[in-house]
Amino acid sequence: MTKFKTLALLFAAALAFVGCSENGSESGRGRASVALSADDSAIELSRASLGLSKPAAADFALTISDASGNVVSEWNSIADYDESTLYNVGNYSAKATYGKTSVEAFETPCFEGTKEFAIIDDQTTEVRITAYVANAVVKIECSDAFKNYFTNYAFTLTTAAGTEIPFVAGETRRAFIDPYTFSVTGSATTQTGSTVKISKSFSNIVAKTLYTVKFDVNSGAVGSATVTISFNDEPVAEIPVDIELNDNI
């Protein structure tokens, strides 16, 4: 009987070992210390700062997930993170978030950063996360020629989620949107009272990128009026689109 009990215990231990191996974890436990920094640079001509008031580390939420993507622990603020928390030996990822990309409006940045790390038995692993702007950033500009030619104008930026952000004449703020696609529609009134309808869609929009949509008339030259829409007239990417105006103009 003793022999059978011993065999049963060995078999149970073997099953437990196999289970741990399949989950990618090993025996032992360790800790993780977390540090965070925010980077508000955007991909544009000079990768210059967006000039944002970067949130403090304490403003970020923190999520720790295992190698399978299962959430192990969550903290509403990194400031509340307990560095004495024990984790099983294995591979993990730490994700820090501030704001939501689904909140699409003027000057509403969202920051996100993820760092993979490994827990080693009886050791503390330093985890340093850099959080970047997770939105696409859009601004609309009008040249002096456009402003002089049209007495009144207004545009609406519509995101893939259907959010409408109005850009009235003189608006200089930037729209922070969920990166995917967006369209710009609007109208402009000439000095003779004619109304010009304007519409253009933009795709392949990515996060951490500043996009500039610029409206001009004849690229500043004289002649029959043509509105030019420039998309990112920076060297990074440029997609000019000419729209023929009303024949009465």
Image (cartoon, helix red, strand yellow):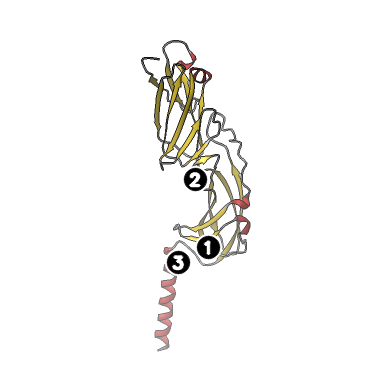
- The x, y position of residue 215, in whole percent, is 47, 23
Q: Secondary structure at mark 3?
A: helix
Image: 44 above or below 82 = above
Q: Nearer the viewer, residue 38 or 218?
A: 218
Q: Is 107 left, or right, of 17 in this rendering?
A: right
Q: Secondary structure at mark 2?
A: loop
- Indicate the amino acid at tag 1: Val
Image: 43 above or below 19 = above
Residue 89 numbered mark, or none? 1
Position of the C terminus by quadrant:
top left
- Indicate the amino acid at tag 3: Cys
Residue at 37 percent across and 14 percent down: it is 248
Residue at 51 percent across and 48 percent down: it is 100
Residue 20 numbered mark, or none? 3
- The x, y position of residue 116, in whole percent, is 52, 52
Would you call the spot at circle 1 few (<14 residues within 10 Å), some (14-19), or many (20 or more)? many
Q: Write down the residue under mark 2.
A: 103
Q: Nearer the viewer, residue 56 or 70?
A: 56
CA distance separating discs 2 and 1: 37 Å
Q: Nearer the viewer, residue 8 or 20?
A: 20
Would you call the spot at circle 3 few (<14 residues within 10 Å), some (14-19), or many (20 or more)? few
